[in-house]
Amino acid sequence: MAKKTAKSIVSTLSTLVVATQWTLWFMLVFAPLTAIGVPYLPLRIGPDPADVDAEGTTFFIGLIFDEGMTRPAVFLEAIIVMVMAGAALYGLHHLRHILRNVSSGAAFVRGNGLRLRKAGYAAAAAQIAIYGLWLISVILEATMGLDFEGRVIILTPMPWVGILGIFVLSTIFLEGAQIKEEQELTV
Amino acid sequence: MSISVKLDRVLLDKGMSLTELSERVGVTIANLSILKTGKAKAIRFSTLEAICRELDCQPGDILFFDE
């Protein structure tokens, strides 16, 4: 009974992972296309362009961009979305493999721990890249006078809690795999 | 440096097959093969005790320390 429940949980999780992957693929393609194309498309749903500050490209594309963003901010945000979506897709690719292993009865195997660790590295790299992009935008603002009005970069340490969690889990998986291997080879 | 298990000679001396030992000790042939081929990471005292009892030998007769 418990095994059946675990199987259905794994199956539900796999479906959710696939759905998230599709959303992320959409965002990955949508972000740069919107950043490049929106100012030229008749898509302005925001305030009347006549009321908009002449410096700002005002539009509203609910998923990714906010109203009142300048062009540089839109590009910055598009790059951030691509970095995040790319890292998340990489992590989800590994999660799918882990779920596949778990459903075939191989939960505590070394490969799962290593895959989780890779996902952790990708998440950490994406987070560092976001800080780097924020720094670049600040430098460009100061030196070239580019206006990043409306940029949204959340500089909190909270993502690191999740990233550390991934690394802790991967260590548990690796340790579990070693214990299981020793257990299996104990006669 | 490793501990190796040498069951062959004792089995030969006692004229016992691996299958028979497996039945008497209550350990599967697969597990006895793991023990015999040196892939085992550990051996339970209960297994060692059963093997020594059935083969009428001492642990030192089947376990060797190679430098």
Image: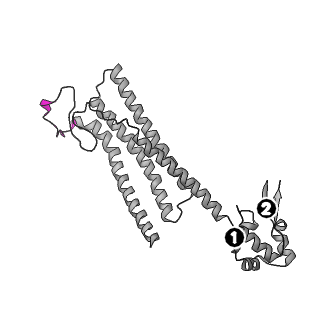
Classify A126 as above or below B56: above
* The C terminus of chain A, quarter of image: bottom right
Q: Residue visible at 50% across and 51% down?
A: A169
Can you tell which quarter of the image residue B35 is in?
A: bottom right
Q: Residue B39: percent from the left, percent from the top?
A: 71, 62
Subunit under mark 2 = B
Circle 1: element type? helix
Q: Residue visible at 27% across and 39% down?
A: A65
Q: Residue A101: percent from the left, percent from the top?
A: 51, 61
Subunit under mark 1 = B
Can you tell which quarter of the image residue A129 is in?
A: top left
- The residue carrying mark 2 is B4
Q: Residue visible at 44% across and 41% down?
A: A160
In this orientation, which residue lies closer to the viewer: B58 or A147?
B58
* The N terminus of chain A, quarter of image: bottom left
In this orientation, which residue lies closer to the viewer: A86 or A128?
A128
Q: Residue visible at 85% across and 70% down?
A: B9
Circle 2: element type? strand
Horizontal side of B12 relative to A43 (left or right) equals right
- The residue carrying mark 1 is B31
Classify B50 as above or below B1: below
Spatial CA span between label 2 and label 1? 15 Å
Q: Please name the amino acid that badge 2 sits on.
A: Ser
First to last magenta residue range: A40-57
The outermost residue toward the top is A143
Count of picture labels: 2
